[in-house]
Amino acid sequence: EEAVSKFYLTGVYFFAVSYTGSNFKRLAELLHMTHLDQHYRSGFAAAADNNELPLKDRSILGSLLPEGLLYILFNYGVDRFTEVFVGNFDTPEVIWSFEMRKHLIEMVRQHLGDFPKRLWQNTTTKYEYCPMPGVSYSRLEREIFCHNYYLNNLCDESRFPDWPIAEPVEVFRACLEEFKKEMSRDE
């Protein structure tokens, strides 16, 4: 268990999400089994109970992947996550495209620098973990994500009529909280 909790120190998550192939299922299985078991947090987040933190703060992938994609992995598992990660989706639950994946890969490669080249030249090269700043996606800049849903798409009745909403009361509560945050920013 201790070894699994430090798995992130190998850089495996950076290498997994920057994989450019379409046969992603085995990597998705690895991500699914381990992403919530990493002990990478510090300060308040490290002391907090996992139930007190949002998924993006509990998962080592939270700074790399958009929340909707992270929830696909959490709620639906490996097969659906694999399908979405290598595809193009624009739904109330997930917004992800080839361009977003390309951007993620570029950001990870920039972060890793020349390490992949050095590793290719010498397979015994040791990776020294360095946290990566969060990846932002321009496509999501104007989106609001509340309790598993992108509100703009969820409210688009012409594209998504009768989209099923799991836990509607929780969605409503999350919307109210987001509204309060927005109102306090404006003051």
Image (tube, helix red, strand yellow):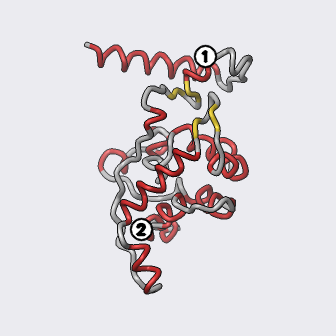
Mark linked to residue 155? 1
Mark linked to residue 130? none
Q: Secondary structure at mark 1?
A: loop
Is disc 2 in contact with disc 1, using a CB cutoff of under 8 Å?
Answer: no
The residue indicated by pointer 2 is: 9
Q: Nearer the viewer, mark 2 or mark 1?
A: 1
Is 3 placed above or below 73 here? below
Q: Nearer the viewer, residue 28 or 110?
A: 110
Is 36 placed above or below 72 here? below
User: Type of residue at label 1?
Assistant: Cys
Question: In the rendered view, does 64 fall on the left or right side of 27?
Answer: left
Q: Nearer the viewer, residue 39 or 72?
A: 72
Q: Position of residue 137 (x, y in %)?
A: 44, 40
Question: In the rendered view, does 54 fall on the left or right side of 75?
Answer: left
Q: Secondary structure at mark 2?
A: helix
Q: Position of residue 18 (x, y in %)?
A: 51, 60
Q: Earlier in the sequence, mark 2 or mark 1?
A: 2
Q: Nearer the viewer, residue 142 or 77?
A: 142
Question: Residue at horizontal 29%, vertical 19%?
Answer: 185
**Where on the picture, by quarter, is residue 95?**
top right
User: Type of residue at label 2?
Assistant: Leu
Q: Could you give the CA–CA distance between mark 2 and mark 1, rounded to whole angstroms?
A: 41 Å
Question: Residue at horizontal 60%, vertical 23%?
Answer: 153
Q: Nearer the viewer, residue 144 or 5?
A: 144
Question: Residue at horizontal 60%, vertical 36%?
Answer: 94
Question: Residue at horizontal 69%, vertical 21%?
Answer: 159
Label 2: few (<14), some (14–19) or many (≥20) C-alpha neighbours in 10 Å = some
Is 176 placed above or below 8 here? above
Q: Position of residue 26 (x, y in %)?
A: 67, 64
Q: Position of residue 187 (x, y in %)?
A: 25, 13
Label 1: few (<14), some (14–19) or many (≥20) C-alpha neighbours in 10 Å = some
